[in-house]
Amino acid sequence: MNTSLCLGALCLYLVITLVVGSWTRRYSATANSFLYANRSLPLPVVAASYLAANSGALEAVGLGAMAAQYGVQAFHFYWIGAIPALVVVGLWIMPLYRRSGVLSIPEWLELRYGPRIRLLNACMLLVMLPLLGGIGLYASSLLLQTLTGVRFITGLWVAAGVVLAYVLLGGIRATMYTEVLQLLILVAGFAPLAIVAARRLHSLPTVDEGMKTHLWTSLPLAQPRSAIDVASITLGLGFVLSFGYWCTDFVLMQRAFAARTDSDAQKVPLLAGFGKLLLSMLVVLPGLAAARTIPGLGSTLRFDQATPAFMQQSYGPILLALGFTAISASLTSALSSNVTAFGAVFMSDVYRRYVAPARSDRHYLLVGRTALVVATFTSVLASYLSFHFGNLMEQSQLIFATFAAPFWAVVLFGFLARKVSESAALIGFFTGTSVAIAHYVAFSYGYLPYGSNMTANFYSAIYSFSAAAFTTVLAAQFLPNLKSLDSPGLLIAWKDLRAVRHDRGIWILSLTLVASCALLNYWWR
């Protein structure tokens, strides 16, 4: 009965996504409209899509696994790992991008540095996006297997096939509108579970497990051999990984650029920040409760199974079907986000520029759709890598520490330092990535002992960012920038920081968001 209801609810959701794909097809007649939706969508849709793009597999399954394994430390990914960066993006980074008039982050990189940096970023994304899409596919298949008994390989191809169908129909618009639907279903499916989890935790005997029950008071200041420490949280997650993700992520900016006005674009990350505060309770509390009520987590059951197992234990047939659909929706949405981003990057930044620069729009539209197929099948292959990690968040943070952390150093100095040239940025990026790879190899073979894989990833991010920053600045002394940077939106200047003071509403949103985050950190300290 439960299996039939779950599969029936999932089928209904999948049919709706295909209808949305068909409805948005009329707006996707050209290659640019199929892969981008710049300055064309209302604020509520863009903000919800922006939040949903970050609320896929890692939110529904990965952070529940983090809560089951590390306790309340999972809140850091929502609070210090998101809110400060979102405020900075809303106040200063988004206006910078909008003034430059670009359609994507790679385009901004070419304006600031040159074509080689744009190509490097495109190649990096073409590696990262299928890896991240594979995480979503793996989680989706694992969910189907846990709740319904469907074979892993069957769930893998079903999820991939449905996602491919609706993104081929409607492109980026179909993805963004289905992300709005996915977010609503996620909240509806997880809100009752969070209430059950809170009651369950309240009824169980109070246990003080140090860093598993306290955010800050039980953490050592700088101790890599502990499960987690203050230095790795504040620097590795709070600055390097967080700012590197929220300020430069292609998928997120592809959505934010779709806002119709500059003011709306600034509000998108701020409104998403409030959504992150809500989602933190909906996703982390079930993971905390699962750790205390589900036997065998971390041994006979993977931590990634914590939330589905707790849902199966706590929900009746109807709520289980809703919760199952909520997780499935978030997982398929995560894959579609990465697939459409892959298509946009390949078509715009590689194929049209270097392979066939003067072909018809119909040809580029066909190439874009073909790239979506390639991205989907590559993600299927990449999903098998997830078996080698304890939980999904550890896998994703390793990817970001290796590629995004050193690239954040390049982008940051691009914002701040006129003297940094394209050659200096290239040297910095490759140095930082090399340090991250060497760090991972040394950790894997036991030469660098850490208290947890997560701590190792955070320190890897710190080291790779630092190496990239140092070598970028050093190389800039010998390879100075000769490129003109007089175009608007390339450098952050003091006048840019003062300009946003005139919009009182954005300042009120920012201050309220920061205050809310601070209060939650104090409450769970």
Image (spheres, rainbow, N blue to C red):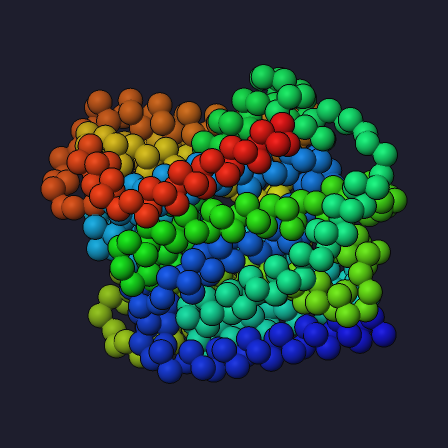
Residue 152 image position (x, y, % from top left): 74, 63
Q: Residue 517 location in percent, x, y?
A: 51, 37
Task: Decide if residue 4 is on the left or right side of residue 439.
Answer: right
> Which residue is at the front of the view, 96 or 244?
96
Hey, which quadrant is residue 224 in on the image? top right
* Residue 259: quarter of image: bottom left
Task: Report the side of 129 relative to 422 (left or right).
Answer: right
Q: Is residue 83 visible?
A: yes
Q: Position of residue 185 (x, y in %)?
A: 61, 65
Q: Which residue is outermost to the right?
A: 295
User: Residue at the spot x=68%, y=73% of the render?
Assistant: 10
Image quadrant for the N terminus? bottom right
Question: Which residue occupies 65% across, 78% down?
Answer: 12
Q: Residue at x 23, y 30 (%)?
A: 417
Where residue 349 sits in the image (x, y, percent)?
A: 32, 58
Query: Is residue 456 shown to the viewer in this render?
Result: no
In the image, residue 299 sits, relative to residue 473, either above or below, namely below
> Looking at this view, is 200 or 235 the one in front?
200
Tell me what residue is drawn at x 64 percent, y 21 percent: 217
> Image check: 207 left or right of 327?
right
Disc tally is 0
Specify whether 395 is left or right of 98.
right
Quadrant holding the C terminus: top right
